[in-house]
Image (spheres, rainbow, N blue to C red):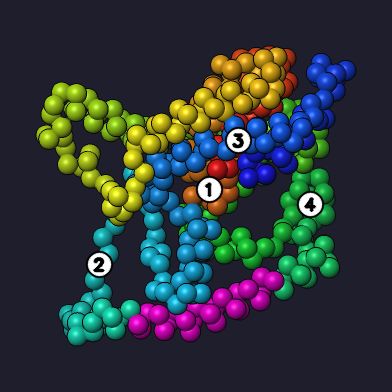
Amino acid sequence: MPLAAGFVGILPALTLLSEERDGTPPIHLSWIEAVAWSCGVAFFGVFLSPPIRKQVIIEEQLTFPSGTATAQLISVLHKLPPPDTTVRHRRGYTHIDEEEHVSHDGAQGPSTPDDLSDEEIETEERETVEHDGWRTLSWSFSASGSLTLFAYFFPVTFTIPLFGNYLAREWLWYFTPSLSYVGQGIIMGFPTTLSMNLGMFVGWAILSPLSKLSGWAPGPVGDMTNGARGWILWTSLGIMCADSFVSLLPVAFDYVGDLIARRNKDYLTVDESRTRTHETETEDRLVPMTWVLFGLVSSILVGTILVWIVFGHEGIKPWATVLGFLLGGMLSIFGVRALGETDLNPVSGLGKISQLVFAWIQPGNIVANIIAGGVTEAGAQQ
């Protein structure tokens, strides 16, 4: 919650304002105002989560590496059957049927005996998880912990100059070994990690030198303000936002089509593929859509009022706060999709997109710009 409410980003930034430089004196919130601000942004993302869950987990079946690893750990600790970790796919991928393994004499390969009951199979799975799972977990934990401890006492491990000291110093081309990211790569699989490596090469081997040598980012490469790191950030955000927006278009079209079909009372004749769902939970375990809509509207109204009470009319206008919530909801979808595919939630970058929009809507209002970024980051973090 401290991170989502901006206690390590937005609120400290407000205290660093300078009237000479920014035209606004620094803003220091009392503990009551800090609580009010936290309550204002605490519930919007919570009510936004049910429809996002349906899209990214049920329909697109994204990986969510940390969640998958947590489920695996729970199964080991509580001696449960391992969770289903089959490769998930993104919407639009074509399913490839697996061919049955056939031996040279035409007979099928070995399969699970039919005479085993479900209880016996479950018991066998539990024993396998208990034995192999604990052993694998212990070895992996020991290796990762040893590497982290070694890097703490020998910091040079974090910046290994694989391509020479000059490229490491001037262009940040160095290697930081981390078994944590190795584990994430194992869960994410080849397609996602290959795309990430391609992005790394294009961003830091092509776009970074191009922006530096062309004078678009004249500062140090690692500078977020006028360096290549900040310049390529906007390129990456544009790519992620465009990809997320296009992938959500079919969902929006299907939803609009269903609404039109219901209005025309032809819902029974709607194509079966449109109404097909991968939902595994029963209706009594799902959050009703009426609750979601009521919660979203209520959280926006309450949040707008609390933000207006805390910062006043001169800080950010109520209509701008409402716009910030709406923009934050859209960008939250992009952040969650990035989290599901890469285990990285670019909340800081998404907040910058919101700040860019408000720099155009309310130019010169630094406070409104920072608050808008805070609202967006809060929704994406939740």
Tell me the element at label 2.
loop
The Cα atoms of the two marked residues, 3 and 4, are separated by 44 Å
Name the foreground residue: 327 vs 337.
Answer: 327
Q: Which residue is mark 2?
A: 99
The image quadrant of residue 261 is top left
> In the picture provided, is 1 more to the left or to the right than 10?
left
Tell me the element at label 3.
helix
> In the picture provided, is 44 more to the left or to the right than 114?
right
Queried whether the magenta region covers residue 108, the answer comes back as no
Q: Position of residue 129 (x, y in %)?
A: 45, 79
| Amino acid, disc 4 | Ala
**Placement of 173 over or under 162, stated as above or below:** above
Of the two numbered discs 4 and 1 on the same chain, state the one appearing first in sequence. 4
The Cα atoms of the two marked residues, 2 and 3, are separated by 54 Å
The Cα atoms of the two marked residues, 2 and 1, are separated by 33 Å
**Placement of 187 over or under 331, stated as above or below:** below
Q: Nearer the viewer, mark 4 or mark 1?
A: 1
The Cα atoms of the two marked residues, 4 and 2, are separated by 47 Å
Name the foreground residue: 333 vs 80.
Answer: 80
Q: Nearer the viewer, mark 2 or mark 3?
A: 3
The Cα atoms of the two marked residues, 4 and 1, are separated by 28 Å
**Placement of 80 over or under 15, stated as above or below:** below
Q: Which residue is mark 3?
A: 39
Of the two numbered discs 2 and 1 on the same chain, state the one appearing first in sequence. 2
Of the two numbered discs 3 and 4 on the same chain, state the one appearing first in sequence. 3
Magenta span of residues: 123-145
Q: Position of residue 382 (x, y in %)?
A: 55, 43
Q: Which residue is mark 4?
A: 168
| Amino acid, disc 1 | Leu
Whether residue 227 appears in this view of the structure is no
The N terminus sits in image quarter: top right
Whether residue 379 appears in this view of the structure is yes
